[in-house]
Amino acid sequence: MRGRDRLRALAAGVVLVATVLTGCASIPDSGPVQEGDPITADVPSDVVYTPKGPVADSSQERILRDFISAGTGPQDNYAVAREYLSAGFADAWDARASVTVRPGGGATTRVGEDELEYAFTATATLDGGGHYVPATTSVPTSLGYSFVQEDGQWRISDAPDGTVLNPATFQSIFRAHAVYFYDPSFRYLVPDQRWFLARSSTSTRIASALLDGPSTWLQGAVVSAFPEGTQLSLTAITVDDGTARVDLTSDALSASDTARARMQAQLLASFSTLSTITAVDLSVESTVLDVPDLGGAAPLRDPTVDARPLVVADGVLGFASRSSVSPLPGLGPVVGALAPTSAEASADLSVVVVGTDRGALRVGADGSSLLVDGRAGLAPPTLDDAGWVWSVPVDDARAVTATGADGVPHAVTSTLPAGSAVVSFRVSRDGARALVLLDDQGESRLLVVALLRDSRGVPTALGPPVELAAPTGRPVDATWADQLTVASLTDTGEGSLVSLAEVGGASAGSGQPSGSATTIVGGNGPSSLRVLTAEGSVLEPRGSSWQDTGVVADLLATQR
């Protein structure tokens, strides 16, 4: 299962968790690009809302209330909702411009003889490009509406574009889909989540979003295999016996053989939430393209790690079971002897970056160690796949540094807000993004930023931060659960709390570990998260609760 399903499984009954079941991936984590097994997912919603048109002689208040309710019916371009609008305004209203999610009721206030104001507290908005933005404030949203009489009946003559939906309706008629781009090395696929109407031409919407490029916050950190300017040459994608036939404009003819294979892989990954598509054929203005096999150069999507917890116990770093710890060759005793406060291992287990009281150290499998950042008061340092060590002082979010294997530090231009303490800074496994947990005067702030690099791959800057729904309580730690889902650990004053949030999606609680939890690390999805308590117990989720694994450790390390 992918992130949306795990979020739902760990927080059953929480509103706004997307119900897309993404099943098996169509793009493997290694090996050649190939057709995948059918995915039993993304079936159209069984719920079809059929709102009714205006009732004769309705008041302005009822017209407004029923118009908002009619936003549940997107059929025929929201034809029923347009019946509530005046003849001069019905065609001008853009229903698809945005969606505002409103969990509670709203209050209507008269501000003029023919004007009403509708106020409510929103939990999220969705823009016309399908970008989901959780609300980060409880300040009420106010929308203004004007009215006019036509043939003796009140109609709305002016209204904000977009619709207002409650969470249950939103999750019934919209679905989340990750559009995939590449990290600059083309080794990893990076998700860019969007939301589209469940009953629209979803494959066409996905492909169009992919060809239009990444979201603003990801620009500069990810790349596309499609030549610039490439668009769909036909208005819709056809699907024949599981194969999506994607016809492109002539711009695509400039793509090399390798680029064509990457284009196909990019599309197939982006279609992975659609049960009707298991393969992709590419053509340019009806001429079929020959697409070679990527073979061993196939990109990785949501790479996995060893299922065993990586810990420091009995003076060594290693993989733990209930009865023993298997030291990492060449690394285990060295790391253990450094009195680590944090540790993060590279994907191939050849390098570990260690946080200590004297700074961040890079430890190699040959037993060598190098102090890469000796500044006092660092947040736990983190690695990326290219071997850069990222570090930032807790008390200065603007002072981000990336240090290469040569030990040379590079200052990174930071976009993180000044004045908040940095609790966690974690680079994603694709190396294109970082998760940041901040302490803002005892309150938690959860951000994701893109990592920008120059043409040589040297880190240069952080992209504009995207703020996720803030978890409740004082921040303790945060981690990537998978490439779309992050997990945060907070202290509510009544115990520890684990919360999940999708990057570009919903948030949900994930239970309360017993004891005082100090660390959370990711594994292979939300069901593989692990928490370390102050007493040294390693816990893992079991349904809606957290259970003791029987592993006892001094430190819980992160695997990339």
Image (spheres, rainbow, N blue to C red):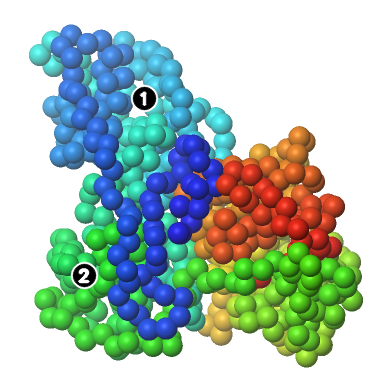
Nearer-the-camera pick, 48 or 389: 48
Q: Which residue is mark 2?
A: 243
In the displayed structure image, the side of residue 133 where residue 400 appears, left or right? right
Query: Mark 1 falls on what kind of element?
Result: strand
In this picture, is 352 found above or below 179?
below
Q: Is residue 49 left or right of residue 152?
A: right
Label 1 environment density (alpha carbons within 10 Å; few <14, some 14–19, many ≥20): some
Q: Quadrant of the C terminus?
A: bottom right
Q: Is residue 202 left or right of residue 462?
A: left
Spot occupied by residue 529 in the image (x, y as percentages of width and height): 63, 57
Instruction: Give the mark toward the camera: 1 or 2.
Output: 2
Q: Position of residue 324 (x, y in %)?
A: 79, 71
Can residue 157 be seen at all in this image of the molecule?
Answer: no
Given the image, on which type of amino acid does mark 2 rest? Thr
Q: Which residue is tagged 1?
A: 144
Residue at the spot x=88%, y=73% of the render? Answer: 315
At 25% from the left and 73% from the top, the residue drawn is 280
- The quarter of the image holding the N terminus is bottom left
Local packing at callout 2 (Cα closer than 10 Å; few below 14, some 14-19, many 20+) is: some
Q: How many marks?
A: 2
Q: Amino acid at mark 1?
A: Gly
| Res. 528 image quadrant | bottom right
Q: CA distance from mark 1 to mark 2?
A: 47 Å
Choose between 373 and 541: the one closer to the eye.
541
Q: Earlier in the sequence, mark 1 or mark 2?
A: 1
